[in-house]
Image: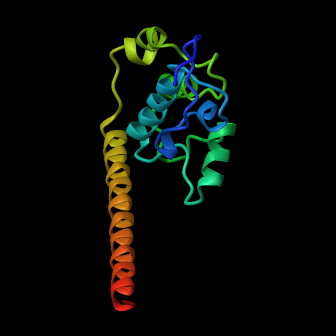
Amino acid sequence: MPTEDHTMSTTCGTPGYVAPEVLEQRGYGPEVDLWSIGVILYILLCGFPPFYDENNSVLFSQIKKGDYSFPSPYWDDISSEAKDLVKKLLQVNPAKRLKSEEIVEHPWISSRHSNSSSALLLQQEQLKKYVARGRFKRAINTVVATNRIKALTVGK
């Protein structure tokens, strides 16, 4: 629910995309969306998320600390301007995070350069792996759920 100063306090969001201030339950504003844009941009540039762990408490710790990197070879051909934009969007302190009007003026957005085709192919492969990993995880969850349902019906 918004307060008089327009901050929200309800904990919500997809774990890997949620901003630190939401996790810390200290109230939040529109800056949380800019954090999520940073996460999405990171994924689009390299094909996997900046924060990941099967254990949500470890994942949330990474997010709260802003503990991510630009690992080689996935980021080798990504421009320094693109990395700079990601860094400025994934600022743990929401006051230091870029505002939407600043994103539009950022050199990576306002310039007209493009990545090399080899970098784009690598990104495409990483995105395919990321999507496949999600499908595999959903398939496992389906099997587990099916087995639980079978166990419940056999037990009756």
Near-viewer residue (57 or 45) = 57
- The chosen color scheme is rainbow
Q: Position of residue 17 (x, y in %)?
A: 49, 39
Near-viewer residue (151 or 138) = 151
Near-viewer residue (82 or 28) = 28
Residue 40, by quadrant, is top left
The answer to whether residue 83 is above or below residue 29 is below
Give the number of marks. 0
Residue 132, by quadrant, is bottom left
The answer to whether residue 150 is above or below residue 11 is below
Q: Position of residue 19 (x, y in %)?
A: 56, 33
* Residue at the front extreme of this rendering: 156
Near-viewer residue (149 or 133) = 149
The answer to whether residue 148 is above or below residue 132 is below
The answer to whether residue 79 is above or below residue 102 is below
Residue at x-position 35% and y-position 79%: 149
Q: Position of residue 2 (x, y in %)?
A: 52, 20
Residue at x-position 35% and y-position 20%: 113
Q: Position of residue 79 (x, y in %)?
A: 46, 28
Residue at x-position 33% and y-position 70%: 142
Query: The C terminus appears in which quarter of the rendering?
Result: bottom left
